[in-house]
């Protein structure tokens, strides 16, 4: 592969387009400026440098295209350019499987690493995709564009401080083939609820079919079947408006789960306990978290050798300190220690009932 330097023109391998290299985010990621002047990161092994002759051809083609645009009417429909070379089809690829894959940039420092998100198109179809996140009852598009058959496309990189923006994700796409007949596919619209707590646990990142590194995988479709279709009714919208105007603090369902090895795992993050914390002070939130802690301890205080993991997060340590103070004062027969670092980082305490 030709060495890529700043100022070179590159073409993308896994999607349509290219641009000029403006710099390097790290040794594996380029910062590329596209024809519209936007900068974005892309993996270096997903690019190929274009030589001067081919670059000149692209420039001439772009000038010719701009001249044609000037002659067209403002109401002319926009067309997505697709390479005339037909991609090689794979057996079984006419049943569409798609997924979002989340990879830590450095799994050895899980407590403070960044994460990368990829979209996998495991099919013989082109997909025109819109990838969105939900915040304050509205949606924001994080990526939209054409994804070629049998490719995995880098969408974005984010830090743990941005995890709350990923609790509700939606993916919509339409599928088609270029210059050939194909079976009709219905448009897909799927909403996913991302369990952000998983990003703090090493065991959440598992072996997968698409990357050599362990990852968190959320399937959108498997063999044409959507994982969860997004159904929004007028009543849902009206209810959302009412809840926004008159917030209620309703406990979430299934906030407690039992692990296979009989360890009770309790997530005390406030957003896992309540649907909304609107209007609550820091003290009120802490009091609510501690009431749940005491509720669980009182339910299990007579179960000898019972192990309970309280997930409180790293934060500034206020909740963890309050838990330890309460254990020393009210539950002197209980033993406590930091929970497994590999599973929870610095953000959990294990309590063992004596």
Image (cartoon, rainbow, N blue to C red):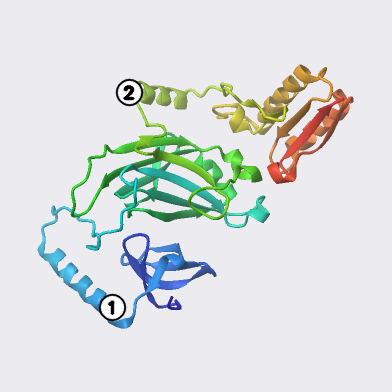
Q: Residue furthest bottom?
A: 52
Q: Position of residue 172 (x, y in %)?
A: 34, 41
Q: Which residue is mark 2?
A: 234
From the viewer's perspective, is 200 left or right of 232?
Answer: right
From the viewer's perspective, is 160 left or right of 332?
Answer: left
Q: Residue at x 58, y 45 (%)?
A: 206
Q: Position of residue 318 (x, y in %)?
A: 74, 38
Q: Position of residue 5 (x, y in %)?
A: 45, 78
Give the label on residue 54, or none: 1
Q: Is residue 268 visible?
A: yes
**With respect to residue 76, does 272 lie above or below?**
above
**With respect to residue 95, does 295 lie above or below?**
above
Q: Residue at x 35, y 27 (%)?
A: 232
Q: Residue furthest right?
A: 332
Camera-near label (1 vs 2) is 1
From the viewer's perspective, is 63 left or right of 303?
Answer: left
Callout 1: helix, strand or loop?
Answer: helix
């Amino acid at each position: 592969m030709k060495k890529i330097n700043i100022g070179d023109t590159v073409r993308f391998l896994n999607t349509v387009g290219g641009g000029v290299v403006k710099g390097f985010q790290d040794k594996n990621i380029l910062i590329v400026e596209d024809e519209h002047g936007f900068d974005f990161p892309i993996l270096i092994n997903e690019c190929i440098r274009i030589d001067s002759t081919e670059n000149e051809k692209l420039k001439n083609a772009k000038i010719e295209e701009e001249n044609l645009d000037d002659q067209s009417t403002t109401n002319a429909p926009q067309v997505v350019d697709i390479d005339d070379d037909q991609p090689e089809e794979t057996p079984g690829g006419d049943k569409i499987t798609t997924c979002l894959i989340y990879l830590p940039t450095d799994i050895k420092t899980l407590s403070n690493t960044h994460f990368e998100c990829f979209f996998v198109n495991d099919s013989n179809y082109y997909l025109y995709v819109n990838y969105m996140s939900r915040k304050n009852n509205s949606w924001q598009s994080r990526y939209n564009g054409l994804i070629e058959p049998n490719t995995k496309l880098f969408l974005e990189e984010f830090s743990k401080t941005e995890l709350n923006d990923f609790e509700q994700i939606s993916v919509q796409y339409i599928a088609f083939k270029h210059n050939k007949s194909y079976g009709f596919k219905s448009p897909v619209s799927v909403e996913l609820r991302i369990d952000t707590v998983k990003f703090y646990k090493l065991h959440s990142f598992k072996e997968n079919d698409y990357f050599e590194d362990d990852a968190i995988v959320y399937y959108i479709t498997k063999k044409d079947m959507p994982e969860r279709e997004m159904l929004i009714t007028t009543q849902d919208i009206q209810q959302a408006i009412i809840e926004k105007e008159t917030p209620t603090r309703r406990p979430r369902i299934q906030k407690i789960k039992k692990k296979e090895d009989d360890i009770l795992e309790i997530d005390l993050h406030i957003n896992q306990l309540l649907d909304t914390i609107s209007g609550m002070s820091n003290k009120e939130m802490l009091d609510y978290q501690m009431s749940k802690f005491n509720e669980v301890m009182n339910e299990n205080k007579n179960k000898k050798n019972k192990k309970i993991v309280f997930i409180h997060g790293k934060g500034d340590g206020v909740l963890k300190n309050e838990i330890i103070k309460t254990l020393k004062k009210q539950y002197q027969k209980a033993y406590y220690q930091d929970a497994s670092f590999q599973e929870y980082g610095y953000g959990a305490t294990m309590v063992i009932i004596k």
